[in-house]
Amino acid sequence: MKLRSVLITAFLFLLEYGVFVDDISGESVSVMEGDSVTLNTNVKTNQQENIKWFFNDTRIAQITGDLSNICTDVQCNEGTERFRDRLKLDHQTGSLIIMNITITDSGLYQLQIISSSSSSSEKIFSVTIHGVPAAERDEIQRKTLKEGESVTLDPGDIKNKDDVMVWYFNDSLIAEITGDQSKICTDDECKERFRDRLKLDHQTGSLTITNTRTTDSGDYKLLISSRNFIIHRHHSISIISEKNFSVNDRSVLLFVIIGICVAVLLVLAGLIGIWCRRHKSGISKNNPSDVL
């Protein structure tokens, strides 16, 4: 463990001053708090590979090519819940996905790939998390609309041709623009959920959801990666069912009508009671014998 720490420290020194060595590769990653990040292995797993991930010398994820041994966080180290279900492993590549990242997730992530030939390769990711200012954290575009309506999520910035724009729905990737290439719903879950209801404007990067459903309610996040910075935009959408909305309206109206009717009946009953007492009193005065 000490030797590994020394190697990592040496690597960071070399990375900082622009000096590189051939036997260790590395990458610096900068991301905003609350976003998701993927640490790529750039390989495709097979049955002869064992991939391990470490965070500050603690194993946090592992996968074998034949998928016989897969673990993340507490599954790898009993009693350790450092990431609390915020880790995902890509079963095809072994890449590590960290969701809803926090400031305390900053540090060194080490990738170790061991093949059946006993050869191994390592890659170190230096991950830096930047906090989101409170004012900016509150700048969430919130929209409420009825089921069946369409909504367009605007990036709010002019898109440059070299920008990489990625849209997420509740931390799941749903659309991406890279240069002149664009992708929408590349996995089965996304395709099943939206079913060709997503429209991506390649010029502006805006995302349109047509024929919205209540299941589309949630958080939509956009990451714009340029050469020197990362911009993030948040949208919160609430879809109200038209059917439920109408039923609720009728229920409220019915209660109002019933309340009015009850009030009118009580007033009428009071008036009738007063009239009856006065009428009886008048009869008694005119016919005293009726009282005896």
Image: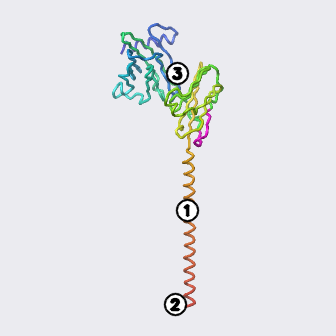
| Nearest the eye: 196 or 19 | 196
- Whole-angstrom CA distance, mark 2 to mark 3, is 101 Å
Tell whether position 152 is magenta: yes
Q: Which residues are magenta?
A: 143-153
Residue farthest bottom in this picture: 289
Residues under numbered marks 2 and 3 in contact, where contact means CB atoms less than 8 Å apart: no
Which of the two discs, 2 and 3, labels the residue nearer the N terminus? 3
Mark number, residue 259:
1
In the picture, the disc for residue 153 is none
The residue beneath circle 2 is 290
Circle 2 packing at 10 Å, graded few (<14), some (14-19), many (20+), is few
Q: Amino acid at mark 2?
A: Asp
Provide the secondary structure element on which disc 2 rests: helix
Give the amino acid type for the residue marked by disc 1 in the picture.
Gly
- Asked if the magenta segment contains residue 223, the reply would be no
| Separation of residues labelled 3 and 1 (CA atoms) | 61 Å
Q: Position of residue 216 (x, y in %)?
A: 54, 37
Rendered location of residue 288, percent (x, y): 54, 91
Q: Secondary structure at mark 1?
A: helix
**Mark 3 residue type:** Ser
Q: Position of residue 268 (x, y in %)?
A: 57, 72
Of the numbered discs in the image, which one, if any, rests on residue 30?
A: 3
Foreground mark, 2 or 3, reads: 2
Horizontal placement of 268 versus 46: left or right?
right
Q: Nearer the viewer, residue 150 or 71?
A: 150
